[in-house]
Image: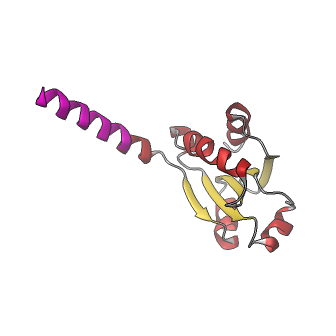
């Protein structure tokens, strides 16, 4: 029984390590890093979020699940705080929290606001590839 328990524990550990190996890179929005990712033709997701936003709280686990998939390992995710980054919001032409914007390099591929449907968020993020 102990051997079986150790085997299961090892399998769970291996699964968690392999899952994190594919996780997309998440950083706070920095204009220089954003422009660098664009110039490198990277897939990019900009997430406009606020800690008090209930829709953002629903989006967060969906985004974590989706961006943990292998096809998104090169995705750069830039989080923008809705309350403190008004200059970035103006630059990106955003006026609501829970907005998701995807780019492929320098070209915006799509955006959504207030979407909590996993399938449509997945379709949006896939446009960055």
Percent of width and height locating residue 33: 63, 68
Q: Which of 2 and 127 is in front in this view?
A: 2
Residue at 80% x, 51% y: name it: 108
Classify residue 27 as left or right of residue 82: left
Examine the structure image and report whether residue 32 is included in the region drawn in magenta. Answer: no
Work out which residue is located at the far left of the displayed protein and give it: 2
Which quadrant holds residue 97? bottom right
What's the image's color scheme? secondary structure
- Image coordinates of residue 68 in percent, x first then y, are 52, 43
Give the vertical position of 11 relative to 75 (above or below): above
**Residue 5 lies within the magenta run:** yes
Q: How many marks?
A: 0
| 1, 23: nearer the viewer | 1
Q: In this view, does 64 lie to the left or right of 22?
A: right
Give, as a single range, the part of the protein colored magenta. Answer: 1-16
Residue ID at (68%, 38%): 126
Which quarter of the rendered picture does the C terminus lie within?
Answer: top right
Asked where in the image residue 5 lies, by quadrant, the reply is top left
Which residue is at a point 67% across and 34% down the rendered structure image?
A: 118
Tell me where residue 71 appears, x and y as whole percent.
55, 39
Compared to residue 8, the image places residue 50 above or below, namely below
Residue 12's image quarter? top left
Magenta stretch: dominant secondary structure: helix
Q: Quadrant of the N terminus?
A: top left
Residue occupying image coordinates x 56% and y 45%: 64
């Amino acid at each position: 029984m102990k051997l079986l328990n150790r085997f299961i524990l090892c399998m769970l550990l291996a699964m968690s390590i392999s899952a994190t190996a594919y996780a997309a890179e998440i950083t706070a929005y920095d204009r220089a890093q954003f422009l660098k990712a664009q110039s490198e033709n990277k897939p990019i997701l900009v997430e406009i979020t606020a800690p008090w936003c209930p829709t953002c709280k629903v989006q967060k686990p969906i985004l974590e699940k989706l961006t943990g998939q292998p096809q998104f390992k090169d995705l750069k995710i830039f989080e923008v705080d809705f309350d403190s980054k008004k200059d970035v919001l103006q630059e990106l032409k955003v006026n609501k929290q829970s907005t998701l914007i995807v780019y492929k390099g320098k070209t915006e591929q799509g955006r959504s606001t207030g979407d909590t449907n996993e399938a449509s968020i997945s379709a949006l993020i896939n446009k960055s590839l």
